[in-house]
Amino acid sequence: MIICSCQRISDHDIHAAIDWMRASDAATIITPGKIYHALGKAPECGGCMKLFVATMRKSDKLEVPAMLRNMRADKATKGTRHEGRQESHRISQ
Ligand code: FES
């Protein structure tokens, strides 16, 4: 089925590109832009993007590599670290 009519990209092309990217680099984050690039094309109107991403999500090889998961700070430590000055460093008046 044609997913992107501007560039004539099919669902088969998208899945083949995902398979190729995952096989060549297991740690890569796969995005629509990388798929276009891998196919030697670029989006034109962007009208297909919702269907494009939905087609990508059907691939079992799209998942984020394990080493890159859970990198966001958990809620228990959130707010306890700051990068700026802490109150104890203020000059008393
Ligand atoms: S339909 Fe895909 S860029 Fe236009």
Image: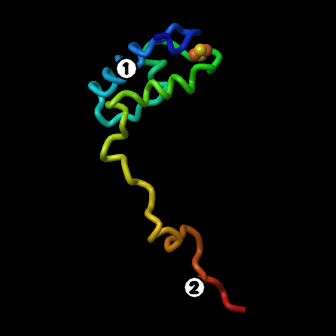
Q: Is residue 11 above or below residue 61?
A: above
- Residue at 50% over, 71% down: 81
When asked about the image quadrant of residue 7, the answer is: top right
Camera-near label (1 vs 2) is 1
Residue in view at x 53 percent, y 23 percent: 51
**How many tags in the picture?**
2
Q: Is residue 56 above or below residue 9?
A: below
Spot occupied by residue 41 in the image (x, y as percentages of width and height): 51, 12
Q: Residue at x 50, y 28 (%)?
A: 53
- Look at the numbered disc 1 and give the secondary structure of its residue: helix
Q: Quadrant of residue 16?
A: top left
User: Nearer the N terminus, badge 1 or badge 2?
Assistant: 1
Outermost right residue:
93
Which amino acid, by three-letter code, is at mark 2?
Ser
Residue 15, labelled with which disc? 1
Which one is nearer the viewer's eye here, 86 or 75?
Answer: 75
Residue 19 horizontal side relative to residue 6, left or right? left
> Where residue 47 sits in the image (x, y, percent)?
63, 20
Residue that numbered label 2 is attached to: 88
Describe residue 46's horizontal placement relative to residue 19 as left or right: right
Q: Residue furthest top?
A: 8
Which x, y percent locates residue 17? 37, 19
Label 2: element kind:
helix
